[in-house]
Image (cartoon, helix red, strand yellow):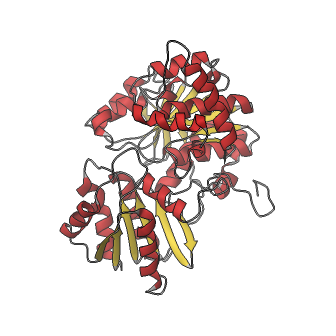
Amino acid sequence: MSDVREWFIGLKVLGMRQSLETTAILLSRLGMPHLKFPSIHVAGSNGKGTTCSILSNCLSLAGVSCGLFTSPHLCFVEERVRIDGVPISPEIFDQCLERIRGEALVEPVTMPTYYEATFLVAMLAFEGAGIDRAVIETGLGGRLDSTRLVHADCCVLTELALEHTDVLGETLGEIAAEKAAIARPGEIFLAKWTYDAEARKSIEDAVGDHKLGFWWRPDRALLVRFDDTDKSHRPISEIATPSGWSPYQKEASILAHATLTMLELFKAAGMMPSALLHTVWPGRVQWLQHEGVPILIDAAHNPSGMQKTCDQLRVQMEQDEAPTPGIVLLGCTAQTDLVGFLNPLVELLVQGEVGHIVVTEPEKGRRPAIKTSVLASELEAQGVPAVIEQVKRPEEALQRALELSKQDASQPILGIGSIYLVGNLLTALGMDTIEAMTTLRPSEDGKHWT
């Protein structure tokens, strides 16, 4: 490991910082790279990463060089910083780190957190590559997230859910206020409609000019302005998505298309059909084959995400659009509502043909993993009709799941839980490569378009 990487890893001891001050100081010392390109800034609880990847790919296919910043990473940190869908190289990442470390050590010493450093790397890498535009995903919340400092000409808020209540607030309204604080004066703000009145008020209050605030209402297939929610501003047409895409992936494509249209980036919006064919957002409703065993991996990291994934699986199984999992590999980090998190999965398992559940503990995550004994006890308490095995290490848990599958005619495996578990599984499956983590895949002739 290089000297600068050791310094970078050491930043993890600083934990999480709810402040923009350090990032702002270092951006200034680095020459304000974040102001060299316009950005689309995306916040939300579920679907924001998928929305970002689709937006980025539409822009790239339209000839707009696009940087994409997301977090956390699954297998390696360079995934957080992509240019036209491809993670930057370790060499470029280290070069950016060297600049950041140099400025951080200038008196007065201003040391970034690990997350702040990755954001600064992205800004320097994007500036160095001369990108035309960036798509930026918030890390946690929005108001005090480092990404709040980018020059955004459009802000997007995806679906909200109760999450990180210890930091963001205990109600949907409080969480909405934190996330909607990414709104910029005089710029377009597009949000997915929520039926929670407190959350709607928080979002509308965050956007000063209601003529620039727009709700996407899936129930009416309309965009409506904040100042007139009963009048259609623009109808939203249905977008044909690839077979097997989940409802939240379809919602992400609609929200991305609406965003590009509102920005009058019509060429990019017109690339949506091609973008959907070639967009891969690793670890999200992703089917893989390993040693002849079908494996479905999904990062359902909160109750809302788990509900959506299980609903989609139920529909696909009923319509014979996907194989029915016979084995489940489950692991998650600390949950505010563990019962609520597991309940959709339990309902799915009761209706299905799952014979074994292997519970494990995700590794390398920022949040502590829930102990296998706790998961096993809760699953048993909810009456899961399956044999439950506890295997602490994810790699060994995967091997056990594969063994069980091969003993029963290569039964499909469902690997589900935290983002960190998904990263552990992809690494164990040999998917920890730049090619595997590239979000814009070429077609068979080597081009990115059809």
The reply to whether residue 186 is in sight is: no
Above or below, comparing residue 323 to residue 25 in the picture: below
Q: Residue 390 placed where, x, y %? A: 31, 69
Q: Which residue is painted at 42% across and 75% down in the image? A: 400
Q: Which residue is painted at 67% across and 33% down in the image? A: 95
Residue sitting nearer the eye, 228 or 278: 278
Residue sitting nearer the eye, 3 or 287: 3
Q: Residue 41 placed where, x, y %? A: 54, 33
The quadrant of the rendering that contains the C terminus is bottom right
Q: How many marks?
A: 0
Task: Quadrant for residue 447, please give it.
Answer: bottom right
Q: Residue furthest top?
A: 107
Above or below, comparing residue 261 to residue 378 in the picture: above
The quadrant of the rendering that contains the N terminus is top right
Q: Residue furthest right?
A: 445
The reply to whether residue 298 is in sight is: yes
